[in-house]
Image (cartoon, grey):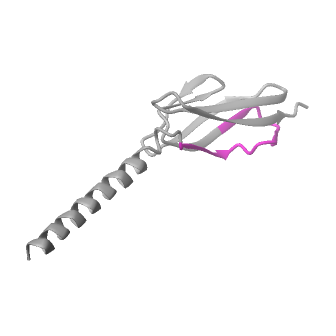
Amino acid sequence: MRKDSIEIYHIAISILVVGIVVYGLFQARVLLGVFHIDIETPVDGTTYTEALVPVVGSVKHAESISLNGRTIPVNRDNSFAESYLLSPGYNEVVIEATNKFGRSEHKVLRLYLETL
């Protein structure tokens, strides 16, 4: 009887240790820089006839986000929406997200404003 209780104790401790390790690895995804920028609009390579373009999207696990170097607000649901004024001709819009550990990811949108 004593041997059975010792085996159960070892099994319980093993399960607890494995659970802690799995939880730690799950939480480490933020440290490892696993975050993503999803741009809903505009679509890369689009040609516009209006200069004011809405930039709408969402970001996961980011502390801040910038649009061509200017910090923009992120809503509680991790979405963002900002207007961007295109110059005539070719434009590059850089959206960069940074997490609280300084890791960053960026997306570049190439947009064209057609002038009449």
Say which of 69 and 56 sits in front: 69
Q: Looking at the image, which residue is at 75% across and 28% down?
A: 86
Q: Quadrant of residue 105?
A: top right
Image: 107 above or below 29? above
Say which of 54 and 25 sits in front: 25
Q: Looking at the image, which residue is at 55% across and 25% down?
A: 71
Q: Whole-percent x and y of residue 17? A: 29, 55
Whether residue 48 is in magenta: the answer is: yes
Which of the image's four quarters has the C terminus?
A: top right
| Tag count | 0
Q: Is residue 96 left or right of residue 13?
A: right
Q: Quadrant of residue 98?
A: top right
Q: Looking at the image, which residue is at 83% across and 33% down?
A: 113
Instruction: Tell which residue pokes out farthest to the left in this image.
Output: 1
Instruction: Tell which residue pokes out farthest to the top in this image.
Output: 69
Q: Is residue 93 left or right of residue 102?
A: right
Instruction: Tell which residue pokes out farthest to the bottom in this image.
Output: 1
Whether residue 31 is in magenta: the answer is: no
Image: 1 above or below 31? below
Instruction: Tell which residue pokes out farthest to the front in this image.
Output: 3
Q: Whole-percent x and y of residue 103? A: 54, 31
Say which of 54 and 7 sits in front: 7
Image: 17 above or below 36? below
Q: Is residue 62 left or right of residue 42?
A: left
Q: Is residue 56 left or right of residue 62?
A: right
Q: Whole-percent x and y of residue 44? A: 77, 42
Q: Looking at the image, which residue is at 69% across and 30% down?
A: 94
Residues drawn in magenta = 34-54
Which of the image's four quarters has the N terminus?
A: bottom left
